Image (spheres, helix red, strand yellow):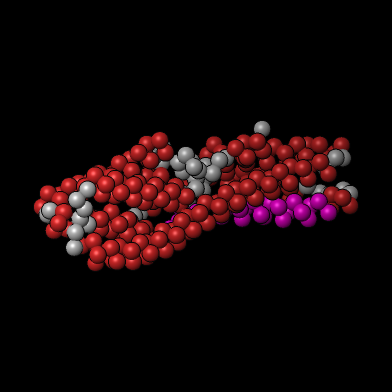
C-alpha cells in the first residue's frame, strides 16, 4: 500500500471507517463460505478440519507476530509524533517565559517583538502547516515566522548577568524548535514501509479465506465464528492504519497546545 493511498484511507471518519472495514471483511468472508458450501457438502469439507486446523494455527502464530510488529511500529510513529509536537510547544512556552528577563525599559519594544514572533509562529503552524505536513510539506510562512523568532532572540543585546544567562538558553531553545519542527515534518519518512503493509494485508486476507474450506454441519455457527474473527482482524488493521498517520483522521495529534501558545 502506498503512502498516499493509506493517507486517503486514514482521512475517513471513524464512524464511517469502522463499519466500512468490518462490512468489507464480513462480505468477503460470507461470500467465500457461501460459494464453497454451495460447491462442496459439509461432509466433503470436514476432512480439511484436521490438516487445515494445524496449518491455520501456524498461520495464526505467524500473523500474530506480523500484526504485533506492525502495531508496535505504528504506535511508535504516533507517540514519536505526539512527543515531538509536545516538546516543540514546551520549548515555545519556555521561550515566552524567558522574555520576562528582559525587563529593562529600553528593551520594551524588543520584548514585545519576541512575544509577538512566538505567537505568530504558533498560529502559523496551526493555520498553515498542520493540514499539509502529513505530506512532508514545510509551509513557507511558518519558515519565515521561525526566522523572525530566531532573529528576535538572537539580536537582542543582554544588559544584565541574568539576561546573559537567559540568552544562552534561548539560543539553544530556538535551535531545538527548529529541530522538533523538522522531526514533525519528516513523519512521512517514518511511516510503515510498503512491504510491511503487503505482508499484513496478505496475512489478513489469508486468515479470512482459510476458514472457507473448513466443514461443519452447523453452518450458522461457522458463519458466526468466521464473522467474529474477521471483525476482530479488520478492527486491528484499521487501528494500525490510524496510528501510522498521526496527523490525519479522528485520532490525529491535536494542535490545541499550539493554539494556547498563539493566544
Residue 63 appears in view = yes
Q: Is residue 49 left or right of residue 245?
A: left
Please provide percent x and percent y for residue 162: 87, 50
Q: Nearer the viewer, residue 243 or 191?
A: 243
Q: Is residue 16 left or right of residue 210?
A: right
As drawn, the residue found furthest toward the left would be 39
Please provide percent x and percent y for residue 159: 87, 48
In the image, residue 122 sits, relative to residue 157, either above or below, namely above
Please provide percent x and percent y for residue 182: 56, 54
Position of the N terminus by quadrant:
bottom left
Q: What range is drawn magenta here?
A: 165-192
In the image, residue 258 sits, relative to residue 199, either above or below, namely above
Q: Is residue 110 left or right of residue 123?
A: right
Instruction: State the predominant SS element of the stretch in magenta.
Output: helix
In the image, residue 89 sits, relative to residue 66, either above or below, namely above
Q: Nearer the viewer, residue 33 or 183?
A: 33
In the image, residue 257 sits, relative to residue 172, either above or below, namely above
Please provide percent x and percent y for residue 75: 50, 54
**Residue 185 lies in magenta, yes or no?**
yes
Look at 60% across and 52% down and name the residue there: 84
As drawn, the residue found furthest toward the top would be 263
Look at 84% across and 49% down and name the residue there: 163
**Residue 180 lies in magenta, yes or no?**
yes
Look at 24% across and 65% down and name the residue there: 50
Q: Nearer the viewer, residue 69 or 138?
A: 69
Residue 120 appears in view = no
Position of the C terminus by quadrant:
top right
Q: Nearer the viewer, residue 54 or 90?
A: 54
Look at 50% across and 43% down and name the residue there: 252
Amino acid at each position: 500500500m502506498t503512502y498516499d493511498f493509506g493517507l486517503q484511507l486514514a482521512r475517513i471518519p471513524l464512524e464511517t471507517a469502522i463499519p466500512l472495514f468490518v462490512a468489507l471483511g464480513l462480505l468477503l468472508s460470507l461470500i467465500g463460505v457461501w460459494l464453497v458450501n454451495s460447491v462442496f457438502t459439509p461432509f466433503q469439507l470436514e476432512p480439511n478440519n484436521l490438516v487445515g486446523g494445524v496449518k491455520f494455527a501456524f498461520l495464526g502464530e505467524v500473523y500474530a507476530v506480523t500484526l504485533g510488529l506492525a502495531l508496535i511500529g505504528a504506535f511508535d510513529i504516533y507517540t514519536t509524533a505526539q512527543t515531538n509536537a509536545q516538546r516543540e510547544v514546551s520549548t515555545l512556552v519556555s521561550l515566552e517565559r524567558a522574555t520576562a528577563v528582559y525587563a529593562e525599559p529600553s528593551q520594551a519594544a524588543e520584548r514585545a517583538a519576541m512575544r509577538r514572533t512566538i505567537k505568530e509562529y504558533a498560529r502559523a503552524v496551526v493555520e498553515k502547516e498542520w493540514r499539509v505536513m502529513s505530506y512532508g510539506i514545510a509551509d513557507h510562512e511558518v519558515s519565515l515566522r521561525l526566522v523572525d523568532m530566531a532573529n528576535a532572540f538572537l539580536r537582542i543585546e543582554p544588559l544584565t548577568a541574568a539576561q546573559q544567562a537567559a540568552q544562552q538558553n534561548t539560543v539553544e531553545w530556538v535551535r531545538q524548535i527548529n529541530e522538533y519542527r523538522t522531526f514533525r515534518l519528516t513523519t512521512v519518512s517514518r511511516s510503515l514501509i510498503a512491504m510491511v503493509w503487503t505482508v499484513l494485508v496478505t496475512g489478513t486476507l489469508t486468515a479470512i479465506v482459510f476458514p472457507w474450506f473448513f466443514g461443519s454441519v452447523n453452518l450458522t455457527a461457522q458463519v458466526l465464528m468466521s464473522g467474529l474473527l474477521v471483525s476482530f482482524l479488520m478492527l486491528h488493521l484499521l487501528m494500525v492504519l490510524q496510528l501510522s498517520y498521526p496527523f490525519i483522521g479522528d485520532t490525529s495529534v491535536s494542535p490545541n497546545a499550539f493554539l494556547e501558545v498563539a493566544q
